[in-house]
């Protein structure tokens, strides 16, 4: 009832190894936190925990064929636990389809040969699992995108209706004090607010014993001496990588905007033939806002985990919901921030990635009366998981009237 779509046992086929390999044991949206920024009596309490207070599954309605999903989509019914504990089913709650969007999976043009131009291009194909939830005024389109390269993309798209209130203002020049929103129509203010969508991802990267690694980009001066990593050249600086393996949960709390770094989840017990630890890396793709509310503010106490986009914890069956089991009455003592504050060990353990997408939403006139879709997301991308590009042997697209003028040996 709380989570919406649950993806279980996400594995991929490694053609070179001739085996299926696990990446994700289970993943779902743990919470959607939407605090509004008007402190007046009629608005201060509007700080919604959509999953914990209302249940995302309850607000999933039938998808509209040909509109919510393309013509090639297959539809599946969804079920959630009702208030009496019995399953409640609904039709067409999830759709699955292949996306052919004209994107490129890989390509290269080699122009170094006299009188010969060699080009190889492979089209990108993505398997999309989609669900839409409409908890009140907003609609959230939740996409899980599985790519042939092994990547998994998580995309959240917002649309729907702004939360508005009446005002005597009819022109922006009349506003002389903080109105806590934007005038989007005569006598209509759309209130400032945030959106935080938190994912619970129980990773099993080629097994259950995983570690969290930060490859920090570090600037170095060229000393001119090979003994210290330099070289006798005119270059004055370069960057290199400082590898940090997280030992405890404190090391697993990351502000992704704090500085350049690759964030990886590796299996220390599995290595490629070249000796690299197999892994996946986390790539933010927009919507990286973190909460700026005061720590002692009531809504921030309930959702204190929104100060960091990334938290890594050891797996615990009881730890599923970011604001705690009883979100409606939460005071902040039971939830993700409190759990990760225990500072348990996360090295070479069965670990969980909690990733929070964040948007500070300043409304604009184009958002009214119905908001055009706004998207953000992140990606889990293979990083030394394969021995080589896993789609090197993908077939080229069939193009009428085109004859291939190059080849790519995948042996």
Image (cartoon, rainbow, N blue to C red):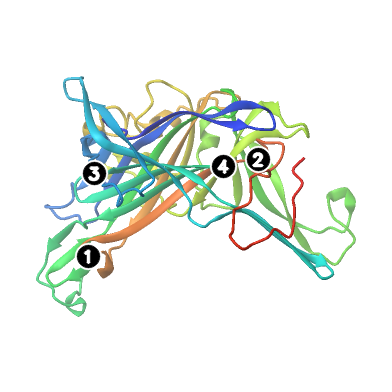
Q: CA distance from mark 4 to mark 3?
A: 37 Å
Image position, residue 132 (x, y; %)? 30, 44
Eye-nearest disc, 2 or 3: 2
Please identify the quadrant where the C terminus is shown: top right
What's the distance in space between the residues labelled 1 and 2, CA to CA? 45 Å
What label does residue 368 carry, if any? 1
Query: In the depicted view, which residue is nearer to us: 71 or 143?
Result: 71
Residue found farthest to the bottom:
173
Q: Residue at position x 21%, y 34% from top?
A: 328
Q: Secondary structure at mark 2?
A: loop
Q: Residue at x 45, y 27 (%)?
A: 342
**Where in the figure is residue 299, as x and y percent of width and height?**
27, 43
Q: Nearer the viewer, mark 1 or mark 4?
A: 4
- Where residue 148 is drawn, which disc sits there? 4
Find residue 391 and report its horizontal and vertical position in percent: 64, 43
* Mark identifier at residue 390: 2
Task: Give the SS element for disc 1.
Answer: loop
- Few, some or many C-alpha atoms within 10 Å of disc 2 (few <14, some 14-19, many ≥20)? some
In this view, the residue in front, 237 or 129, is 129
Q: Earlier in the sequence, mark 1 or mark 4?
A: 4
């Amino acid at each position: 009832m709380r989570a919406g779509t649950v993806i279980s046992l996400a594995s991929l086929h490694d053609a070179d190894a001739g085996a299926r390999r696990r990446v994700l044991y289970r993943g779902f949206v743990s919470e959607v936190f939407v605090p509004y920024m008007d402190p007046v009596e009629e608005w201060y309490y509007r700080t919604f925990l959509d999953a914990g207070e209302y249940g995302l599954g309850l607000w999933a309605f039938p998808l509209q064929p040909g509109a919510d999903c393309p013509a090639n989509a297959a539809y599946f019914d969804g079920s959630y636990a009702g208030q009496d504990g019995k399953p409640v089913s609904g039709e067409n709650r999830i759709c699955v389809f292949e996306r052919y969007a004209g994107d490129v999976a890989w390509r290269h043009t080699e122009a170094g040969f006299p009188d010969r131009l060699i080009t190889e291009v492979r089209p990108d194909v993505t398997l999309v699992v989609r669900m839409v939830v409409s908890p009140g005024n907003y609609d959230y389109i939740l996409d899980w995108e599985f790519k042939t390269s092994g990547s998994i993309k998580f995309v959240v798209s917002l649309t729907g209706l702004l939360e508005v209130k009446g005002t005597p203002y009819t022109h922006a020049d009349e506003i002389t004090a903080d109105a806590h929103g934007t005038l989007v129509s005569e006598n209509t203010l759309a209130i400032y607010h945030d959106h935080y969508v938190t994912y619970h991802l129980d990773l099993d990267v080629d097994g259950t014993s995983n570690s969290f690694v930060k490859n920090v980009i570090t600037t170095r001066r060229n000393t001119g001496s090979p003994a210290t990593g330099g070289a006798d050249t005119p270059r004055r600086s370069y960057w290199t990588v400082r590898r940090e393996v997280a030992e405890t949960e404190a090391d697993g709390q990351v502000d992704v905007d704090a500085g350049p770094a690759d964030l990886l989840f590796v299996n220390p017990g599995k290595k490629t033939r070249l000796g690299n630890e197999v892994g996946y890396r986390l790539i933010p793709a927009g919507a990286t806002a973190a909460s700026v509310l005061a720590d002692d503010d009531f809504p921030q106490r309930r959702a204190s985990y929104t100060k960091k986009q990334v938290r890594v914890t050891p797996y615990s069956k009881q730890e599923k919901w970011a604001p705690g089991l009883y979100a409606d009455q939460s005071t902040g003592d039971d939830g993700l921030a409190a759990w990760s504050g225990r500072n348990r060990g996360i090295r070479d353990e069965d670990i969980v990635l909690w990733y929070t997408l964040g948007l500070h939403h300043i409304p604009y006139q184009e958002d009214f009366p119905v908001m055009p879709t706004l998207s953000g997301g992140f990606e889990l991308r293979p990083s030394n998981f394969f021995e080589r590009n896993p789609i090197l042997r993908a077939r080229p697209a069939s193009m009428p009237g085109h004859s291939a003028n190059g080849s790519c040996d995948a042996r």
